[in-house]
Image (cartoon, rainbow, N blue to C red):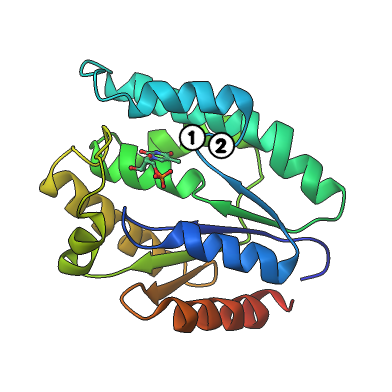
Amino acid sequence: MTGPVYVTLEGPEGCGKSTQAQRLAGDLDAVLTRETGGTPIGRRLRDILHDVTVDDLDDHAETLIVAADRAQHLAQVVRPALAAGRNVVSDRSVYSTLAYQGYGRGLPVDEVRRINEWAIGDSWPDLVILLDADDEVLTSRMQGRELDRFERAGDDFHARVRAGFASMAAADPDRWVTVDAADPPDAIAAIIRAAVSERLGI
Ligand code: TMP
């Protein structure tokens, strides 16, 4: 590819993607950002989404809140950075909504996709790095962490999210790279860096 690139890291809680996003952004001299909460408005929306005292948020409302976070994030952070010639590495993206609100909550994935297309236009990530590991590894990484609304959503929900990520990766192999999150962090970082170089030519 010529020009700046937009790379996202995706995966379930405990997969280590935030650490890897940081490392990759450092390697690429990229703008490091995140969804949800990558903007001041997004941080206010994130507070609602994660609040464990919120127990009556409708699934459609949840979907629109994450899409609103994303519209603001694309307008305020991602597109300006790309327009200025900077690479962008984002900790989560539109694919998290398809996985969590579509596959996880059980809303029709096509509808969730359409709402997000309206929110972001054609600003889809160029490359998706999916970090995945089996439940044992992920659960052990979550030990001792205070759980938020999503983390409390139950094993079936999280199994659907993981299956959703896997099925999107299988359906679009040019855009997705799946990495084993059980490997040591240095090895994962090297695999990701090699994949970015091979796929995007940077
Ligand atoms: P984080 O801890 O990686 O920031 O993720 C926060 C939670 O938000 C995680 O459980 C996934 C969830 N989430 C969604 O449900 N939909 C989305 O679109 C995004 C970006 C995150």
Q: Residue at x 33, y 22 (%)?
A: 60
Question: Residue 74, percent across and down?
Answer: 66, 37
The quadrant of the picture occupied by the C terminus is bottom right
Q: Label 2 is placed on what type of residue?
A: Glu
Q: Residues within 10 Å of mark 2 (few under 14, many from 20)?
A: some
- Gap between marks 1 and 2 measured at Cα: 5 Å
Q: Label 1 is placed on what type of residue?
A: Arg
Q: Secondary structure at mark 2?
A: helix
Q: Is residue 154 left or right of residue 184?
A: left
Residue 60 is tagged as none
Question: Residue 114, percent across and down?
Answer: 48, 34
Q: Residue at x 63, y 60 (%)?
A: 126
Question: Residue 149, percent across and down?
Answer: 26, 32
Q: Which residue is mark 2?
A: 117
Viewer-proximal residue among 201 and 28: 28
Q: Is residue 31 left or right of residue 190?
A: right
Viewer-proximal residue among 15 and 109: 15
Q: Residue at x 41, y 73 (%)?
A: 178
Question: Residue 199, percent across and down?
Answer: 63, 77
Q: Secondary structure at mark 1?
A: helix
- Asked if disc 2 is less than 8 Å from ligand 1, the answer is no
Q: Is residue 7 left or right of residue 165?
A: right
Q: Which residue is mark 1?
A: 114
Q: Quadrant of residue 24?
A: bottom right
Residue 166 to residue 115: above or below: below
Split into quadrants, the picture shows ligand 1 in the one at: top left
Q: Are marks 1 and 2 in contact (CB under 8 Å)?
A: yes
Q: Residue at x 73, y 79 (%)?
A: 201
Point out the residue furthest to the right here: 84
Q: Residues within 10 Å of mark 1 (few under 14, many from 20)?
A: few
Res. 20 visible in picture: yes
Viewer-proximal residue among 148 and 145: 145
